[in-house]
Image (spheres, rainbow, N blue to C red):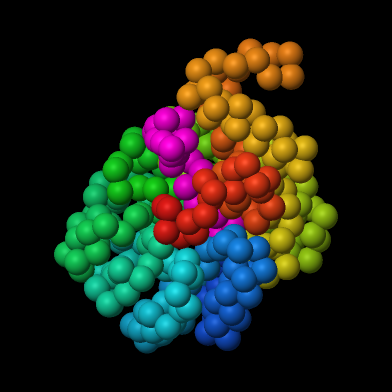
Amino acid sequence: MTDPRSILLGAQAGAFALPVCDHYSGVEARMRKSLQLQAEMTEEFGTCVFDVTLDCEDGAPVGGEAEHAALVTELALAAAPGARVAVRVHPVDHPAFDADVATIARRAGSRLAHLMVPKVESVADVLRAVAALDAAGATALPLHVLIESPAAVHRAFDIAAQPRVQSLSFGLMDFVSAHGGAIPAAGMSVAGQFSHPLVLRAKLAIASACHAHGKVPSHCVVTEFKDLDALQAAATTAARELGYTRMWSIHPDQIRPILAAFAPSAREVDTAAALIERAMAADWAPVQFEGRLHDRASYRYYWQVLERAHQTGLPLPETVQSQFAEPLALRH
């Protein structure tokens, strides 16, 4: 049977190509714990439900950039089979950038899920990062970029159009700071980041740019990491209202609320599975279902519901389980 992804998704496949949570850590003990937690939750859910991104930008002490790059390289190489491990390097204009990429991508490029580059301002920065990756021999390694300024938001569509770019993330704190006090500190809070017009406009622009080019929009952090109710509310808003299909975590306790917020309901999953089963039986021709006419446009939506269910570790009805037999890390 033809893979539904090839029939239904086309360019839109990219927006759902990654686990819904990207967990960041930069201190050695926490990086090791994050990788262990990833392995435990992969066993629990039957698929890898979050990425672990090892952080050089905020994790490396000043003057210790080379040692930290060597450390994250060793951790990536030692990760369990099937683990999804990434690295955030320094910005392209930082003195450590070239050494970061040369060390990490050359030795562990084939082991990484992606490389995150912060403070990307333009297509030229993307091309600079791509050239560094290619020079290190990591010619197939996907690139994730952080959009952290008003100018970068303005160029988000052009940045998202670059073939090596797989995902755009929004850098909330730097974005607010870039306005020189014109956005109050409350704009960095869990409430203010969803109400201040300039912040909200930036989030929508990034999500729109990603969906225009089949890339993954990744929502920013919630720094109030002890307030899990606020975190889940923020994640739900990002997923249900702003068009994001992925979100950052900066504390292990944030991972499960993010998974829950981005997961479809059990009723949505059952409806999607029943409709997709009917569509497959009709060889994707239009069908009537629950009093409505459906065709490939709506099949696409309901298939994406099943994709999200799988990515968040929800059990799938037997009728569609075979479509997800291959682990997410291998399918993408």
Quadrant containing the N terminus is top left
Q: Where is residue 322 in the image (x, y as percent from the top left)?
A: 54, 49
Left or right placement of residue 199 versus residue 226 in this view = left
Q: Quadrant of residue 303?
A: top right
Q: In which quarter of the image is residue 313?
A: bottom right
Residue 197 in sight: no
- Depicted 192 relative to depicted 137: above or below: above
Residue 317 in sight: yes
Q: In which quarter of the image is residue 132?
A: bottom left
Q: Which residue: 52% across, 37% down? A: 207
- Depicted 202 relative to depicted 72: above or below: above
Q: Which residue: 35% across, 54% down? A: 143
Q: Which residue: 73% across, 13% down? A: 291
Depth order, front residue of 170/47: 47
Q: Position of residue 18 (x, y in %)?
A: 50, 52
Q: Position of residue 27 (x, y in %)?
A: 54, 81
Q: Which residue: 61% across, 63% down? A: 46
Q: Position of residue 266 (x, y in %)?
A: 76, 43
Asked if residue 10 lies in the magenta stretch, the reply is: yes
Counting every numbered tag in the picture gives: 0
- Depicted 216 relative to depicted 97: above or below: above
Magenta span covers which residues? 1-22
Asked if residue 4 lies in the magenta stretch, the reply is: yes
